[in-house]
């Protein structure tokens, strides 16, 4: 690469102070974590002891470490990496974000301990560091970058990065679930968001997507290993595992919905009904005292029946409505969701057959028992006790793996191409011989099938099925997870589902404002990033139909989801 | 009415005309009070290039839409190899009739290769289950679709552009890509709606060569064009539509010399293709 020409060299001279300032700021942040932040040992997980960083101190150190890393990549021992990553932009984002984080921390200390007088030098040092970093980063000049498309791959390094990243996710998840103090919880989220933004601005995730493309299988495997290891970090505690299983059920359903919404491009506002029909089938065909069907086949058969019932319902709803335009489908599915709930409410023997016990639902569903493995009992593996929810966690992990497989493989098949064509121009697709109606119906039915599958497990895990679990709000949340996370991607929906399920569990205090906040969040997302947190490239293009630059960029990177995995 | 033309054109010998591919009888299309196509008879034989001309708003595109099942004609029948086609675009494509659009309708956010592969959709049958399991059928069809699509891109001269997004391609390439996509459906008859609109003279010449090449593959071709020189050099027979009615239907020589054609153009619009031509 050529060196920057005259105007840039001038800027370089002028801004020679930027880099040292940023480096010193980052180092101060790093060091501040080692000092005491507050007099009061009883608040925020004890941040009063020097050289024993906890909670907020630890987070500040992480941000400081990211800053040092970026600064040394800009100039210094790691400067060769600076040819690839936009360290200047990364430092700028990190500066602003760290400032935000430190201010948040000071507010937390002040509000917990009663006033800023309780802040020790460590806290003020962190503030000074963040300020220096913010100011310094403004003056760090941008360097000329190479494109990742031209980067020589170093498989060992890349796999190490994948493994480290996954380990970080595992520890982060275990750590954050263990925090009960909302200040620490939110502080962690702020820190994670800041670090994420800084790395994103530096182009780290663009590189990661290239890496992911090259090591798709390693990445998938690593993700599953991490997810598999998660229960072992919980010391037999079932509290967090209960949340984790709920997240998994929710995520599995949301990925199923993403086939309908993100791939087939259909708006389904009553998707929860399919989960519900699976759950009711699971409940009716269980050994529960109030189960209404005396027949109890093996669970795998129950799962299939539940899924087929849901898919049949999907076909019944879909076949008349999918012929007409999308808006009607939204209304019909909305109504269908309500009809489902009301039917479950009323099929109690007084009106029609007794299938669901009406408003009482079907309680007391026994735990699953597969091949002699009782899901209700704790098991000890490698000396670590795994409770009831861990058992469900593992079977749900299998389920989610299956759903992801269906999602990605359909997406990369002839069917997936048909769906894209329909989303792009339905009339043209029809004129090219694509069976538009059949494909839409297929998307709808596959989505329903997968939700039904998840529902049968959910019934056992909840030990009950009742109408009030399957209300419209749940459908809305599922859709929100898809829209927030990213239409057409698995990773995005996993993140969206985790956010939407985990936050309310951990932040009980805001449960009253939950809907308000989610509404706000969605509105903001629609304004700034309509394609979702982790967007599929194709969806991103669709949302930015006249962004030439983006189109060129995506083209240079290749369409990742279009990568022909099976073309051999 | 069928004169077998053996004239030598462009240095190419015309292949002998074969069986009747398309036969439209008394096709009429009404939009409320407007009769866009009025009792038009039309037929195309194997190995033939037929032109469709007429001033703006004459009903050419509407006639195409009637032939390809996009519109259900108010009256009249369209027969393909002697069988009446249902007015469903998909059935028409499946039977072997493919088209391009006057206002390009590519799938902009797909790559060139993917666009052509969508054209293969109706000739492949892998369903959801084999796609999820990556069964042998899926593998075979996927590989076949891919190689055939690449072959077609090479055929229309876009072999090197397969990874480009359709929306990033130059205009002329987009027109050729639409042709490749239509060819991917394995048609016996291809209908091109203004394939050279917006092209420069060089590209127009390439388009003409491409159409001859398609004909030489044994396909029948119908072309709508405003460029008269292009039409008269290319076509074996020409139908001139004016206000929805078939004015003249014959060899290029006959149509060219017919005073009514000249009058229709001068009266309503222009004979030569102009830059300011309206695109519907
Ligand atoms: N869907 C429709 N509804 C109502 N009127 C229509 C419709 N489609 C076409 N028309 C009318 O039918 C007439 C013929 O239009 P058509 O597009 O077939 O003309 P054309 O010969 O293709 O013209 P051009 O050379 O400009 O492409 C026009 O007057 C047009 O306004
Ligand atoms: Mg037209």
Image (tube, coloured by chain):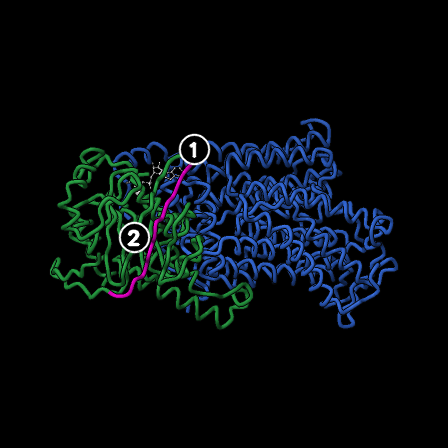
Chain colours: A blue, B green
Residue A197 lies, with reference to residue A376, above or below; the image says: above
Does the stretch in magenta take in B88? Answer: no
- Locate residue A111: give its quadrant: top right
Q: Are marks 2 and 1 on the same chain?
A: no
Viewed as shown, does residue A231 lie left or right of A376?
left
Which residue carries the number 2 mark? Answer: B42
Which residue carries the number 1 mark? Answer: A138
Q: Which residues are magenta?
A: B18-32
Badge 1 local density, few (<14 within 10 Å), some, or many (20+)? some
Answer with the quadrant where ligand 1 appears in the image: top left
**Foreground of the two, B58 or B144:** B58
Residue drawn at point x = 29 percent, y = 56 percent: B43
Viewed as shown, does residue A166 lie left or right of B114?
right
Measured as percent of width and height from the top left, residue A390 is found at 73, 60
Measured as percent of width and height from the top left, residue A60 is found at 59, 41
Residue B163 lies, with reference to residue A50, above or below; the image says: below
Inter-mark Cα distance, 2 to 1: 72 Å
Residue A54 visible in the current orientation: no
Measured as percent of width and height from the top left, residue B102 is found at 31, 45
């Amino acid at each position: 690469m050529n060196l920057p020409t005259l105007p840039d060299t001038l800027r370089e001279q002028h801004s020679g102070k930027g880099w040292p300032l940023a480096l010193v700021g980052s180092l101060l942040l790093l060091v501040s974590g080692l000092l005491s932040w507050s007099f009061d040992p009883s608040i925020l997980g004890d941040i009063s002891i020097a050289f024993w960083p906890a909670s907020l101190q630890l987070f500040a150190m992480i941000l400081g470490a990211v800053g040092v890393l970026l600064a040394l990549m800009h100039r210094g021992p790691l400067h060769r990496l600076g040819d690839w990553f936009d360290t200047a932009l990364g430092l700028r984002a990190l500066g602003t974000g760290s400032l935000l984080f430190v201010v948040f921390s000071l507010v937390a200390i002040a509000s917990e301990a009663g006033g800023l007088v309780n802040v020790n030098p460590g806290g003020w040092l962190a503030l000074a560091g963040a300020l220096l970093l913010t100011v310094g980063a403004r003056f760090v000049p941008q360097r000329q970058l190479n494109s990742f498309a031209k980067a020589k791959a170093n498989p060992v390094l890349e796999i190490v990065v994948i493994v480290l990243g996954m380990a970080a996710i595992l520890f982060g998840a275990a750590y954050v679930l263990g925090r009960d103090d909302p200040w620490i919880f939110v502080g962690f989220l702020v820190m994670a968001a800041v670090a994420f933004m800084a790395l994103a601005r530096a182009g780290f995730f663009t590189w990661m997507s290239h890496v992911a493309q090259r090591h798709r299988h390693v990445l998938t495997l690593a993700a599953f290993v991490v997810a598999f290891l998660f229960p072992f970090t919980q010391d037999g505690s079932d509290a967090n595992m209960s949340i984790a299983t709920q997240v998994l059920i929710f995520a599995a359903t949301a990925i199923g919905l993403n086939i309908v919404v993100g791939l087939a491009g259909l708006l389904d506002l009553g998707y929860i009904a399919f989960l519900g029909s699976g759950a009711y089938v699971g409940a009716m065909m269980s050994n529960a005292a109030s189960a209404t069907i005396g027949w109890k086949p093996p669970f795998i058969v129950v799962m299939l029946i539940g899924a087929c019932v849901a898919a049949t319902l999907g076909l019944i709803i879909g076949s008349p409505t999918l012929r007409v335009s999308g808006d009607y489908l939204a209304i019909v599915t909305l109504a269908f969701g309500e009809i489902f709930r009301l039917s479950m409410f009323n099929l109690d023997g007084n009106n029609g057959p007794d299938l669901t016990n009406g408003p009482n639902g079907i309680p007391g569903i026994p735990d699953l028992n597969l091949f002699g493995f009782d899901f209700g009992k704790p098991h000890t593996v490698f000396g670590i006790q795994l409770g009831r929810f861990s058992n469900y966690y593992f079977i749900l992990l299998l389920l989610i793996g299956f759903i992801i497989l269906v999602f990605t493989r359909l997406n990369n098949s002839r069917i997936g191409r048909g769906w894209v064509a329909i989303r792009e121009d339905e009339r043209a697709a029809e004129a090219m011989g694509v069976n538009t109606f059949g494909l839409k119906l297929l998307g709808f039915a596959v989505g329903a099938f997968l939700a039904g599958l998840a529902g049968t497990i959910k019934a056992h895990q909840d030990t009950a099925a009742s109408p009030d679990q399957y209300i419209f709000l749940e459908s809305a949340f599922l859709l929100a997870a898809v829209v927030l996370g990213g239409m057409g991607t698995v990773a995005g929906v996993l993140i969206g589902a985790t956010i939407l399920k985990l936050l309310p569990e951990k932040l009980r205090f805001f449960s009253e404002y939950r809907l308000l906040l989610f509404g706000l969040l969605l509105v903001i997302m629609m304004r700034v990033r309509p394609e979702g947190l982790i967007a599929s490239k194709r969806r991103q293009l669709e949302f930015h139909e006249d962004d030439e630059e983006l189109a060129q960029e995506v083209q240079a990177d290749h369409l990742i989801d279009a990568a022909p995995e099976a073309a051999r | 009415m069928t004169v077998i033309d053996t004239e030598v054109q462009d240095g190419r010998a015309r292949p002998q005309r074969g069986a009747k591919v398309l036969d439209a009888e008394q096709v009429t299309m009404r939009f409320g009070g407007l009769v866009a196509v009025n009792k038009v008879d039309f037929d195309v034989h194997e190995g033939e290039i037929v032109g469709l001309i007429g001033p703006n708003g004459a009903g050419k595109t509407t006639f195409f839409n009637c032939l390809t099942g996009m519109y259900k004609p108010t009256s009249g029948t369209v027969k393909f190899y002697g069988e009446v086609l249902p007015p469903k675009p998909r059935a028409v494509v499946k039977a072997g009739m493919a088209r391009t659009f006057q206002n390009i309708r590519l799938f902009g956010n797909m790559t060139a290769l993917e666009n052509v592969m969508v054209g293969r959709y109706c000739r492949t049958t892998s369903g959801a289950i084999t796609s999820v399991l990556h069964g042998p059928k899926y593998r075979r069809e996927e590989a076949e679709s891919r190689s055939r699509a690449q072959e077609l891109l090479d055929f229309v001269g876009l072999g090197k552009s397969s990874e480009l997004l359709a929306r990033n391609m130059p205009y002329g390439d987009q027109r050729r890509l639409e042709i490749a996509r239509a060819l991917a459906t394995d048609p016996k008859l291809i209908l091109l709606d203004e394939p050279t609109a917006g092209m420069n003279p060089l590209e127009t010449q390439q388009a003409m060569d491409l159409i001859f090449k398609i004909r030489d593959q044994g396909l029948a071709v119908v072309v709508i064009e405003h460029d008269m020189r292009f039409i008269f050099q290319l076509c074996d027979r020409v139908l001139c539509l004016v206000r929805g009615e078939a004015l003249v239907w014959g060899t290029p020589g006959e149509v060219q010399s017919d005073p009514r054609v000249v009058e229709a153009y001068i009266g309503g619009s222009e004979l030569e293709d102009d830059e300011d031509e309206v695109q519907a």
